[in-house]
Amino acid sequence: MTDTLDSLELRAPQERERDLMARLPALVALAQGAPGWGRILDGVDSATVDSRAALARLPVTRKSDLKRLQRERKPFGGLNRTATAELSRVFMSPGPIYDPEGRGRDWWRFARPMYAAGVRAGGLLQNCFSYHFTPAAFMVEGGAMRIGCTVIPAGSGQTEMQVLAMADLKPDTYVGTPSFLKLIIEKARDMGADISSVQRALMGAEALPESLRAWFRANGVPHVFQTYASADIGSIAYETASAGVINPGMVLDEDVLLEIVHPGSGDPVAPGDIGEVLVTVFNPDYPLIRFATGDLSAIVAGAAAAPCGRTNTRIKGWLGRADQSTKVRAMFVHPSQVHDIAQRHPEILKARLVVSGRVADETMTLHCEMDDAAGAVGALAIVDSIREVTKLRGEVRMVARGSLPGDGKAIDDVRDYS
């Protein structure tokens, strides 16, 4: 049998989907008991939210909204079901944005990515995520406690002390950012210290290009994994391996219901297309429903099961940010405005606003996929909508269905900035 944290990771996809949909109405009802969600989900009959189609009709709440929501109702925007006095910790990210941590075991669900990376009971890991205000280090602590391994609470910084700890204590695992492990390895080389006990690394909070993964392997760390998590959600997805080879994509966490939507809207993209990550999390302390992360990703096409045997949906990991807002002639243009224009004209199947030319002498052209791209009917009405929504002049270019790339871009800024 595949070596997984538990049998949930091996469920048939249909069984998992039935379970998620069966749990969804209760989650919506629970959230509605929080004042913030009660306002957002006002008028929603929770009992009817029992399918992905029903979920897709609910409002999107954006990570970028949290600062405003929390300013209006401190400290968590009224999105929490558990009172502050009953929480375990409260974190603070730049903004500021405040995030809660409840008292449940492995509250951030971080044991799964750690276990997939090879962390086991009786192991020793050096936790180099910051313990200062932010939750990443405590995500690792919760996962380690569930697995039963020992943690060196190293935090970030003090590179020489990090090397000394590795040389003396012989941890088998590093957890932290890729850039900091690279600094540690280079410092160890300068000091002549032996840190070869570190045979695996679980990376997060930064991109991990394949060139850097190869550098780690060439410098004594053969097993390098990355995880995708956030301070609001906890673990979202993580890499797995089979026979020492990283499997394609990142496997979703068992308590995450994921949607990939067009940036600036809540409408699902075509399977395999890049779009914004929306997450619904079954968290009794801090339920999140259709929470837009602002990140871009895509679902890995093909069979659901990874070579490691885990059957959950896989995504392509972090592919950039969804906020493509740009400024044209002193006015901001947002992806949501592109979506609004397209919604006004049902004949538009897909739209992308291309900003070209030189700064201060640019041209805005809305590329519109249509079944009848050769016909000019409706072009003038779309031009009027562009002006009404953006307060700027724009042109329209009609293209055939399937002409626009599925890369998640609602706005493509190709201006000459030289």
Image: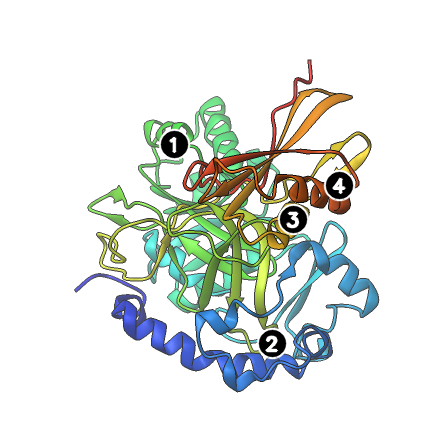
- Which badge, 2 or 3, is on the more N-terminal residue? 2
Q: Is residue 48 left or right of residue 313?
A: right
- Give the residue at mark 2: 285
Task: Give the vertical position of 125 relative to 177 (above or below).
Answer: below
Label 4, label 3: how many angstroms apart (C-alpha)? 10 Å
Across and down, in percent, residue 240 comes to: 31, 51
Number of numbered discs on residues: 4
Q: Are marks 3 and 1 in contact (CB under 8 Å)?
A: no
Reading the image, the residue beneath label 3 is 341
Q: Which label is found at residue 387?
A: 4
Q: Closer to us: mark 1 or mark 4?
A: 4
Three-letter code, disc 1? Glu
Mark 4–mark 2 Cα distance, whole angstroms, equals 44 Å
- Earlier residue among tags 2 and 1: 1
- Under mark 3, the amino acid is Ile
In the picture, the quarter occupied by the C terminus is top right
Percent of width and height locating residue 381: 67, 44
**Is residue 93 at all visible to an observer of this figure?**
yes
Marks 1 and 4 close (CB-CB < 8 Å): no
On screen, 171 above or below 37?
Answer: above
